[in-house]
Image (spheres, rainbow, N blue to C red):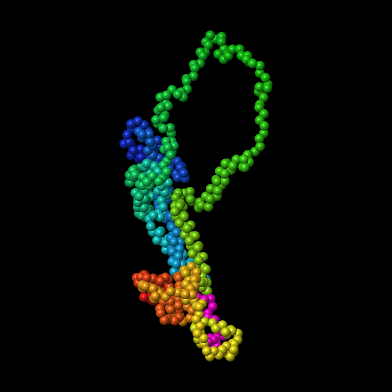
């Protein structure tokens, strides 16, 4: 036997009336209110049963009736829309984490692959991550959507039942029925099965505890009580207010045979009737609709309705037939928006990489190779005393200055002069500010033991100064160029030490390991007593 939705709805209502007949009938609680199809906030309530309890509150039970021709209401389908949104959020999070990690390490994806291969890599990685996440999420039962369950989630009733024709699950895999049972148990909904010969089987009892902790909106009273409350109706009957008095009895019909029963006596007008009293009042003509600027409230409401209709027109046509299918929580929308902003920023920072490194980069080098005075290093006539990378300003890249013009015979007598303007300490702070001292207090003359993180020793001040500026700009740490005589007695040349002068051996060793781990700098601890 094939049941229609109306048959199942009637059988379910009769079952509920029998199921709740044990309710006490004292006062007005025994009054039943049975109503059929009703629409409430985009949800179709197939049937509902309600009665007023002794405390005057309403008990409401709603039913979602499903026949064989509407089997899709209880058979689950995979919510691919929500899977796509969650997979997109996961993909954005992975890409943001990957690019942020490379950015912190001073690397760049554009440097690894170059243009245009980097764009192919990013697109491939994005689609691969999205596809893998979507495949994994599609296997999770959370994304199984059932129309009947989704309707009940949108509002709260004291008891919510799903009634279905038994033939629905005879030709489909077992997992569809198991999923319906699982979701009914999870959300606290009742389940009844309509079988042969109008037999209704009670499968699951609805939960008496709200599984949503009161977060759903309740059905309003006017939905539960589709007619006047019983208590008020009985009260109106007992009061004389509003009663219409019975009409007066008609006069007796004369039977003398002489009096006309239709005679109303002599009738004369009590006043002189004038034609002016019956003249129709002249109503002056009015203009059309009031302009919109004279009714701003109505115009604002009209704009709001138009905006909402335009926004809803972007939704798929089936959105009204799938409540909750295309809805997303606010936290997910906000997360996707924030991740898109972060990903755009990281794309911009990574794409700024160029072949020529900028100052401050991890692999920053000079934009030009060391200058040579001639076309090739082999033909260069630079002085052999120059260190690699130094430029001999006496030479030109176009022509070589004759050697004889460069030779100056040394004086036969060299006067011993004391230079008073020799820079003994040149310090560069972390912010790049430099300070110069032309005199220093030697550390070996002080009492106590001091520790310096020595980076290297250099014979000339210019070489040491260039090295110190590079270290400061590259690693952003305080760097000091000091005369060796300021640290150790009888030493010549200059030394470079990093950071501050330390007084503890433990702090010096810790700082030594920190420089080696973070920057790859190999330094030595110089002990000055």
Which is more toward the observer, 163 or 185? Answer: 185
Q: Residue at x 53, y 79 (%)?
A: 369
**What is the quadrant of the C terminus in the image?**
bottom left
Q: Is residue 393 above or below residue 55?
A: below
**What is the quadrant of the N terminus in the image?**
top left
Q: Residue at x 38, y 36 (%)?
A: 57
Q: Position of residue 102 (x, y in %)?
A: 45, 68
Q: Position of residue 289 (x, y in %)?
A: 63, 39
Q: Is residue 314 left or right of residue 280?
A: left
Which is more toward the observer, 375 or 480? Answer: 480
Q: Residue at x 53, y 90 (%)?
A: 412
Which is more toward the observer, 226 or 256? Answer: 226
Q: Quadrant of residue 197?
A: top left
Q: Is residue 302 left or right of residue 50?
A: right
Q: Position of residue 415 (x, y in %)?
A: 51, 86
Count of marks, rendered view: 0
Q: Is residue 421 magenta?
A: no
Q: Furthest-right residue in view?
A: 275
Residue 504 in view of the camera: yes
Q: Residue at x 51, y 83 (%)?
A: 417
Q: Is residue 194 above or below residue 466?
A: above
Q: Is residue 380 magenta?
A: yes
Which is more toward the observer, 387 or 330? Answer: 387
Q: Position of residue 198 (x, y in %)?
A: 35, 42
Q: What's drawn in magenta, residue-wise? A: 362-383
Q: Quadrant of residue 522?
A: bottom left
* Prevailing secondary structure class for the magenta stretch in the rendered image: loop
Residue 47 in view of the camera: no
């Amino acid at each position: 036997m094939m049941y229609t939705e109306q048959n199942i709805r009637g059988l379910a209502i009769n079952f509920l009336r029998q199921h709740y007949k044990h309710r006490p009938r004292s006062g007005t609680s025994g009054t039943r209110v049975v109503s059929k199809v009703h629409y409430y906030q985009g949800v179709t309530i197939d049937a509902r049963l309600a009665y007023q309890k002794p405390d005057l509150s309403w008990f409401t039970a709603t039913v979602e009736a499903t026949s064989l021709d509407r089997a899709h209401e209880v058979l689950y389908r995979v919510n691919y829309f929500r899977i796509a949104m969650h997979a997109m959020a996961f993909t954005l999070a992975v890409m943001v984490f990957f690019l942020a990690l490379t950015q912190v390490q001073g690397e760049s994806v554009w440097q690894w692959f170059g243009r245009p291969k980097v764009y192919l890599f990013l697109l491939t990685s994005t689609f691969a991550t999205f596809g893998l996440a979507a495949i994994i999420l599609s296997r999770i039962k959370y994304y199984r959507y059932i129309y009947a369950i989704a309707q009940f989630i949108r509002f709260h009733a004291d008891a919510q039942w799903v009634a279905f024709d038994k033939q629905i699950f005879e030709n489909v895999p077992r997992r569809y029925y198991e999923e319906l049972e699982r979701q009914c148990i999870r959300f606290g909904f009742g389940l009844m099965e309509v079988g042969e010969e109008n037999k209704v089987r009670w499968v699951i009892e609805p939960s008496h505890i709200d599984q949503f902790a009161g977060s759903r909106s309740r059905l309003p009273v006017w939905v539960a009580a589709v007619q006047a409350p019983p208590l008020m109706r009985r009260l109106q009957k007992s009061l004389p207010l509003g009663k219409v008095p019975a009409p007066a009895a008609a006069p007796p019909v004369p039977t003398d045979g002489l009096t006309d029963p239709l005679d109303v006596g002599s009738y004369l007008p009590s006043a002189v009737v004038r034609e002016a009293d019956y003249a129709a009042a002249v109503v002056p003509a009015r203009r059309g609709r009031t302009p919109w600027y004279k009714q701003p409230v109505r115009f604002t409401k009209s704009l709001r309705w138009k905006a909402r209709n335009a926004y809803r027109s972007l939704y798929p046509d089936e959105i009204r037939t799938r409540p909750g299918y295309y809805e997303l929580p606010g936290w997910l929308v906000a997360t996707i928006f924030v991740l898109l902003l972060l990903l755009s920023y990281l794309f911009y920072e990574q794409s700024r990489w160029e072949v020529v490194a900028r100052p401050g980069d991890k692999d920053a080098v000079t934009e030009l190779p060391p200058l040579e005075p001639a076309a090739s290093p082999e033909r260069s006539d630079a002085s052999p005393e120059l260190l690699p990378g130094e430029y001999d300003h006496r030479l030109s890249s176009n022509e070589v200055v004759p050697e004889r013009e460069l030779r100056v015979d040394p004086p036969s007598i060299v006067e011993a002069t004391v230079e008073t303007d020799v820079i003994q300490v040149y310090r560069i702070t972390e912010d790049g500010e430099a300070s110069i001292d032309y005199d220093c207090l030697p550390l070996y003359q002080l009492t106590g033991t001091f520790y310096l993180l020595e980076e290297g020793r250099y014979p000339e001040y210019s070489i040491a100064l260039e090295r110190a500026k590079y270290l400061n700009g590259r690693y952003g740490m305080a760097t000091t160029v000091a005369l060796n005589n300021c640290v150790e007695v009888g030493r010549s040349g200059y030394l470079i030490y990093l950071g501050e002068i330390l007084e503890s051996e433990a702090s010096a060793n810790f700082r030594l390991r920190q420089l080696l781990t973070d920057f790859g700098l190999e330094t030595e601890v110089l002990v000055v007593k």
